[in-house]
Image: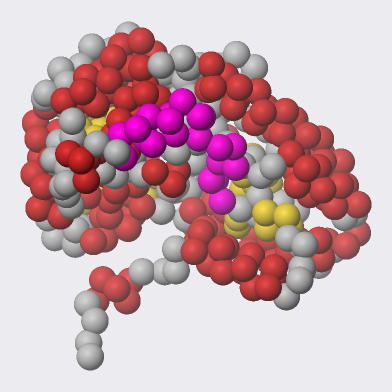
Amino acid sequence: MKFSDRLGKLSPYPFVEISRIIAEKRAAGVDVVTFGIGDPDIPTPQPIIDRLLKASQDPPNHRYPETDGLPELRRAIAYWYDQRFGVKLDPDKEVLPLIGAKEGIGHAAFCFLDPGDVALVPDPAYPVYNVGTMFAGAESHVMPLYERNGWLPELDAIPADVAKAAKLMWLNYPNNPTSAVATEEDFVSAISYCRDNDIALLHDAAYSEVGYDGYKASSFMQVDGSAEVGMEFHSLSKTYNMTGWRIGMAVGNADMIKALFQIKANLDSGVPQAVQEMAIEALTSSQDCVDENVAIYQRRRDRVLKALGKLGLRTPVPRASLYIWAAIPEGFTSAEFAARLLDETDIVVTPGSSYGKFGEGYIRLSLTTPDDRVEEGCRRLENWTMPQLSA
């Protein structure tokens, strides 16, 4: 049996490998503390669950859904964007529900890229931007993200011939894995660059609702010109603790939304309607649960930062996202450092190299771990002294 060449190009998905390591350790009786995967431990709010329970009893919801979702859901998404960002969207032309943002991001490459085309992909970054590009038979041109530049792409460093060949650009702010944020001016620059070079600009905004110390992220769609060149992907996963229910959305340029719908209509059957009703409840009811989540994550952020500081790791204070991006000591690769942590403290973190070449030298710690486990992990970190790390 011969499998496709693209299958041979795939590295193991980092979070599948992390889950395997955790399962093996726990099966051996090891008390593992994981800061590895950004999967909220806080339950989905009860009113959202109640809406699911009610909707599950409705026979029409037992049938195939439509790929473009319930009209009521598209209106709820448009309502949320208006309430949160002041962005006006046509729910019939500029909104598309997704089976989680990851699905839409993976499918988006097929809308814009043919074999041999070029996508501008940040590094370090969420791996799906690059993987989707590869599945479409296209090539990724890496836009390195550096700490010196606030983990923003240096657009003027992109060669002119690459800019001319590129069909799309990926951005993601607040950023995974670095927790960096972007200003309106940053978005203006990216929009101008993409308009000048006829490039589709795709923005992943999955972490916009997790902001600390009063910080509120902007939407790319708030910026003048965004609807001319771009589309934004969002998710209910992190905002409402709904990772397991798999629902998100794409909004923006009507032609791009139509193209993504055409791809999805041929590859999936849409979001189960009872889950769509959960999303309607989440988007249109009280948003107090979002503030409550952020308060929990901020408390955890502060505790982990304290432990990392005592350990001696250089760690900027994140303004947003669910992650802490910490520089590791010289003399280790990020994978080696993560392995030492696991072997010597039974703590799981994600090596920065999992997010690309330019993630080397860092580790990512997720804040989606229960408070008692965060405290246990921090205690272990504080007792793990730097002399143990000497090469």
Question: Does residue 88 appear in the picture of this structure?
Answer: yes
Q: Residue at x 18, y 52 (%)?
A: 268
Which coloring applies here?
A: secondary structure
Relative to 202, residue 378 above or below: below
Q: Residue at x 56, y 37 (%)?
A: 43
Q: Position of residue 253 (x, y in %)?
A: 16, 26
Left or right for 187, reference 370: left
Quadrant (top left, top right, bottom left, bottom right) of the C terminus: bottom right
Q: Residue at x 67, y 54 (%)?
A: 34
In reply to whether residue 20 is colored magenta, the answer given is no
Judged from this view, the residue extending furthest toward the bottom is: 1
Q: Nearer the viewer, residue 88 or 291?
A: 291
Left or right for 288, reference 131: right
Q: Position of residue 257 (x, y in %)?
A: 15, 33
Question: Does residue 166 appear in the picture of this structure?
Answer: no
Q: Nearer the viewer, residue 62 or 71?
A: 62
In reply to whether residue 49 is colored magenta, the answer given is yes
Relative to 353, residue 20 above or below: below
Give the residues drawn in magenta, as a range: 37-56
Quarter location, residue 198:
top left
Q: Residue at x 59, y 27 (%)?
A: 293
Q: Position of residue 300 (x, y in %)?
A: 71, 34
Relative to 166, residue 228 above or below: above
Left or right for 22, reference 219: right
